[in-house]
Each structure stands twice: as C-alpha cells, then as structure tokens.
Image (cartoon, rainbow, N blue to C red):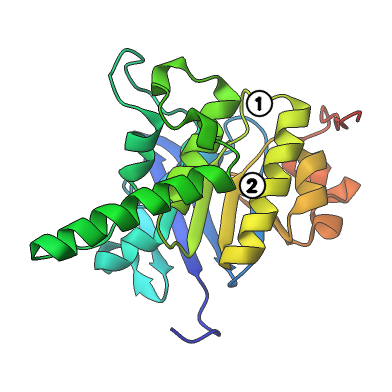
C-alpha cells in the first residue's frame, strides 16, 4: 500500500432509515496516521455515519473505500480495522473472561502440525497479555467481563483492538460513561498507542474540549458535512453555530 492512498475515502454517502434522511451527500477522507473526530448534535447521524462506513448498515447511495478498496471487497483486509461501538450489549452472566474476550481479536491463520499449533497458542497468549498490559488491564485478565466497570470494559475493548495488527481504529462514543479523569487518561493512552502502532483513528465524540486537545482533524456533521478541517477551524464560533444551532453551549473540563 502506497502512502499517498487515503486510509478511508467517502464520496456522496446518503443513508435513509425508512423514510427518514439520516445522512445526505457526505464526503471526506482520512489520511494515514491522523486522528479525526466526528462531532455534532444528537440526531446528526454520527453513529449512522461510522456504521455505514463499516458496512454495518446499508447505504442508499455513495461510495466507501478503505485501504484503496471498496468496503464490500476488503476480504482479509477487514481484519486491519478495529471497532469500538458505543454500546456493547451482552449477557453479563455469560461465562467469558477478559483474556478470552481479548483473544477473540487474534486473527492469525490456522496453522498445521503440532509444533505450529503450539507456537500459535504461545504467541496468542503472549499477544493477549501484551495488549492487556499496554492498556493497563493485565490485572483483569482472569476476571469475568460481566464484573467490569464501564471504564475497565473500555480498556478491555481497546486491548481487543490491539491484540492483532490494525491500521484503522473506529470509535463510536468510546468514552461514554467514563468520567472526565478517565476520559483524559484514555485519550493519553490512545495517543501513545497511535504513535507506536501508526494507527489512523476515526472517532465520534460529544466532548469538544477533549477533541480540541487530542485530534488532528474534525468533521462537523448535521446530516451533512457542515465543515471539515483542523480543530481551530472547525470550532470557530461561526462553524459551531452552523453545526449545533443558536442554543449551543460549550462545556469545558475542570482539571
């Protein structure tokens, strides 16, 4: 893959949910190694956008390419995408440990021969422990996922994304339910891993203050792209009013 190919390219994306127009003619692209946030009011279509980009919900029109290929023809390259949804719904009584959940993200092909299978098992265990250690969650490895707090579970999901090589990480309100301090710590961790792994990140967020501090690019969305650019440009008073309307009130964290 050449470095001048966008990691993600979206052109003319339109999505209807029944008769409701959720997204209209959305176009943007992500350059390698960037951290881009999608912001906008409730009902603006932010989650719909990331879900349609990942081909989780149908598009009415428009084209999506990831790694230079149509999203419907990614094949094994789909394993290069990590996704953290806003709501991860599961039966909290389901008997699966943190290590087992993270291990589901391991994507190596099935080896042949006893020695190869043993080496794969060893490599998998090492990768799980390294991912949990990197996200400060190694001490949780034997804990049932149903017993985790919201912040702990976010770190485990990040470890799931980290356990195998990825190029694109998509976060849909990944910090929902996490307090201000936890969000700041998570952003610090995310940026460290981004630099180390060379990730490109696309995230949905309501937290303009944290986006302003941590992201390279911002897409202001309200069914269509209102503006796109650096945080300084996107968060001008004019663009915020155009995106959120006259009732918009900006919130700043107090540290």
* Circle 2: element type: strand
The tag earlier along the polypeptide, 2 or 1, is 1
* Circle 1: element type: loop
Quadrant location, the C terminus:
top right
Q: Residue at x 77, y 28 (%)?
A: 180
Q: Residue at x 58, y 57 (%)?
A: 201
Mark 2 sits on what residue?
221
Q: Nearer the viewer, mark 2 or mark 1?
A: 1
Tell me if mark 2 has few (under 14), some (14-19) or many (20+) residues whose alpha carbon lies within 10 angstroms of its own: many
Q: Please say if the residues under marks 2 and 1 sit with CB atoms less than 8 Å apart.
A: no
Q: Residue at x 42, y 68 (%)?
A: 66
> Whole-percent x and y of residue 62?
40, 62
Q: Residue at x 87, y 49 (%)?
A: 238
Side (left or right) of 105 relative to 169: left
Question: Of 164 and 39, which appears nearest the observer?
Answer: 164
> Whole-percent x and y of residue 174?
57, 37
Q: Can residue 91 be seen in the rendering of this structure?
A: yes
Question: Of 36 and 178, which appears nearest the observer?
Answer: 178
> Whole-percent x and y of residue 58?
31, 47
> Whole-percent x and y of residue 185?
73, 38
Mark 1 sits on what residue?
178
Q: How far apart, in angstroms, are the residues tagged by discs 2 and 1?
A: 23 Å
Question: Of 100 and 223, which appears nearest the observer?
Answer: 100
- Where residue 64 sits, quadrant-wise, is bottom left
Query: Does residue 130 sit above or below 183 in this rendering?
Result: below
Query: Does residue 28 sit above or below 59 in this rendering?
Result: below
Which disc number belongs to residue 253? none
Question: Of 136 and 43, which appears nearest the observer?
Answer: 136
Tell me if mark 1 has few (under 14), some (14-19) or many (20+) residues whose alpha carbon lies within 10 angstroms of its own: some
Quadrant location, the N terminus:
bottom left
Q: Can residue 106 be seen in the rendering of this structure?
A: no
Query: Does residue 68 sit above or below 60 in this rendering?
Result: below
């Amino acid at each position: 893959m050449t470095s001048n190919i966008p990691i993600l390219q979206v052109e003319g994306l339109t999505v209807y949910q029944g008769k409701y127009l959720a997204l209209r003619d959305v176009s943007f692209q992500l350059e390698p190694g960037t951290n881009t946030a999608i912001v906008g009011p409730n009902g603006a279509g932010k989650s719909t956008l990331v879900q349609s980009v990942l081909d989780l919900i149908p598009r009415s029109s428009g084209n999506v390419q990831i790694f230079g290929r149509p999203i419907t023809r990614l094949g094994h390259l789909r394993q290069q995408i990590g996704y953290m949804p806003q709501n991860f719904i599961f039966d909290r009584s389901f008997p699966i440990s943190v290590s087992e959940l993270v291990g589901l993200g391991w994507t190596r092909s099935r080896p042949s021969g006893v020695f190869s299978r043993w080496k794969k098992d060893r490599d998998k265990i090492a990768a799980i422990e390294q991912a949990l250690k990197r996200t400060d969650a190694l001490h949780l490895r034997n804990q049932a996922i149903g017993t985790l707090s919201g912040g702990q579970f976010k770190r485990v999901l990040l470890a799931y994304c980290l356990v195998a090589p990825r190029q694109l990480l998509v976060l849909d309100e990944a910090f929902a339910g996490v307090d201000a301090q936890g969000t700041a710590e998570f952003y610090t961790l995310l940026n460290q891993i981004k630099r180390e792994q060379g990730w490109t990140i696309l995230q949905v967020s309501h937290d303009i203050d944290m986006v302003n501090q941590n992201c390279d690019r911002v897409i202001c969305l309200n069914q269509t792209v209102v503006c796109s650019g650096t945080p300084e440009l996107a968060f001008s008073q004019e663009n915020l009013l155009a995106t959120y309307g006259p009732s918009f009130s900006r919130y700043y964290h107090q540290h």
